[in-house]
Amino acid sequence: MAKQEDVFKTIIAHAKEYGFVFQSSEIYDGLSAVYDYGQNGVELKNNIKRYWWEAMTMLHDNIVGIDSAIFMHPTIWKASGHVDAFNDPLIDNKDSKKRYRADVLIEDEIAKFDEKINKEVAKAAKRFGESFDEAMFRQTNPRVLEHAQKRDALHQRFADAMNANDLAELKQIILDYEIVDPISGTRNWTDVRQFNLMFKTEMGSTADGAMEVYLRPETAQGIFVNYLNVQKTGRMRLPFGIAQIGKAFRNEIVARQFIFRMREFEQMEMQFFVRPGEELKWFDFWRQTRLKWHEALGLGNQKYRFHDHEKLAHYANAATDIEFLMPFGFKEVEGIHSRTNFDLSQHEKFSGKKIQYFDPELNESYVPYVIETSIGVDRMFLSIFCSCYEDQDLGNGDRRVVLHFPAALAPVKCAVLPLVKKDGLPEKAREIQHRLRFDFTCQVDEKDSIGKRYRRQDAIGTPYCITVDHQTLEDNTVTLRHRDSMQQERVAVADLERILAEKVSLNNLLKKLL
Ligand code: ATP
């Protein structure tokens, strides 16, 4: 079996070859951890955003959207704590001159214990065959228990150091566990230092004393500072939410794993304002609601898991991540946080403006509490892309690469293919495309053999191919080929809009959420 690392490399190559994701500034040798979306990538990305936006703003009467600017008053980032505390602990290896996040090096070390446990389990499963009781084995096997105990001890020490912001202890852990630089293989480490992740720039001309501003590291603050505007102009009553999709920027120390960790990325965030004391009920609601949104895509429910935070930010009283099984393990795609009234209170303090809600039922005013759901568009894209990719063996030495995208998210919904490039078939294909293109992204492809054209559409995840042949000219029927089963059926041209709408419409996905 191919190693997961190789599979991931193949997927990245496929994303480039078929116009999904390109390295930014590639002809200038690229810009690290910055990517561009190509002709198919942008369609998939827009569909993901639409799915999220409509699920939030159309399926919830009490959620509205906004679009705030990337530049904001610099005091906002002082108030939010980002100027003082949006840091990662970094460490350099003196031999390779490479920079790493100390916390990630240690987390990788913790993950090694789990890998060892999984190896023991796999070995035993092979030995015992059908009668293997995995749960029992995990609970009782001495080697598994030893690895688990070592893992937990390291985890505890790491969590204590992070909570205490103890940089010397982080370095000591790296030394004690003999963690080596994956490139140089040495343990020649510098001390651990804090590194602020915000990008700075200047606004206004330097002559009149330019103001230093930041590129926003999250979209959420644009929502908090507009809370009063939206609440008042929209006459919103608690509980209510504000949703936003937009770019965010972080000067990540270690940018790797393709579009998983980028320096410029996109977030879809929703802040849900509630009465104090009701936040944990709503936290639970959003935890379930968001998982349902993910699961409705049909990528496989076993690929998701919650990871509850043990280390909470000082202002949070609950936090969890929704993790997805990527080719490099379970990784965070979305965070759900109960942020108390921290952000609004801070903005009240720093701006001097009253940010309160008058609750007519309680007849009192207070600063609302907030539940946040925060998901990265690019990570969502990556999780869908990886799990839909299949290099399929069709038997008899035949293979195809197919992207099994959920039909509603596929960049191209259908392709109309004239069987031959003559006898009026291309003209008929165009005529059909001109009808369908009002409702669906629809291509005509007439180059190469029909088999090659099917493969090309499979490789970009087009759910339906419509083949126009000589019979079409006689009875106005076509063959409709289904991407996943490769089965074909004869249907009337007049029925195409209805059939396609049933299969590829975003409404089908949205209806699963209710
Ligand atoms: P991580 O621990 O992986 O750095 P985080 O906990 O800092 O992530 P949040 O601040 O909770 O992430 O951001 C919310 C979401 O934004 C994440 O779940 C992720 O999907 C996305 N995100 C955060 N940083 C990046 C990045 N550098 N590149 C792409 N997406 C990101």
Image (cartoon, helix red, strand yellow):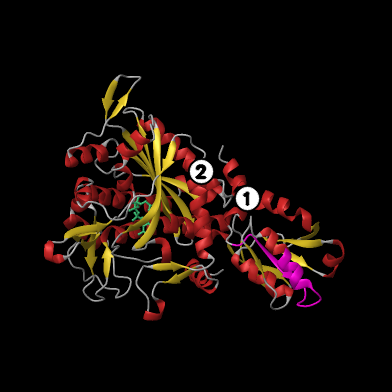
Horizontal side of residue 442 vs 215, given as left or right: right
Indicate which disc, 2 or 1, sits on the residue closer to the N terminus. 2
Residue placed under numbered mark 2 in the picture: 55
Name above or below for residue 42 compared with residue 80. below
Horizontal side of residue 143 vs 263, given as left or right: right
Please, what secondary structure does the residue beneath circle 2 have? helix
Which of the two residues, 187 or 386, is positioned nearer the viewer here? 386
Q: Amino acid at mark 1?
A: Ser
Q: Residues within 10 Å of mark 1 (few under 14, many from 20)?
A: some
Tell me if residue 438 is in the magenta stretch.
Answer: no
Which residue range is magenta in the image?
Answer: 412-431
Tell me if residue 415 is in the magenta stretch.
Answer: yes
Residue placed under numbered mark 1 in the picture: 505
On the image, the x and y values in percent for residue 45 come to 49, 58
Q: Quadrant of residue 378?
A: bottom left
| Label annotation for residue 5 | none
Name above or below for residue 356 compared with residue 428. above
On the image, the x and y values in percent for residue 154 come to 29, 52
The residue drawn where x is 87% and y is 65% is: 474
Residue 173 in sight in this render: no
Q: Quadrant of residue 27?
A: bottom left
Q: Residues within 10 Å of mark 2 (few under 14, many from 20)?
A: many
* The C terminus lies in quadrant: top right
Q: Amino acid at mark 2?
A: Ala
Q: Are marks 2 and 1 in contact (CB under 8 Å)?
A: no
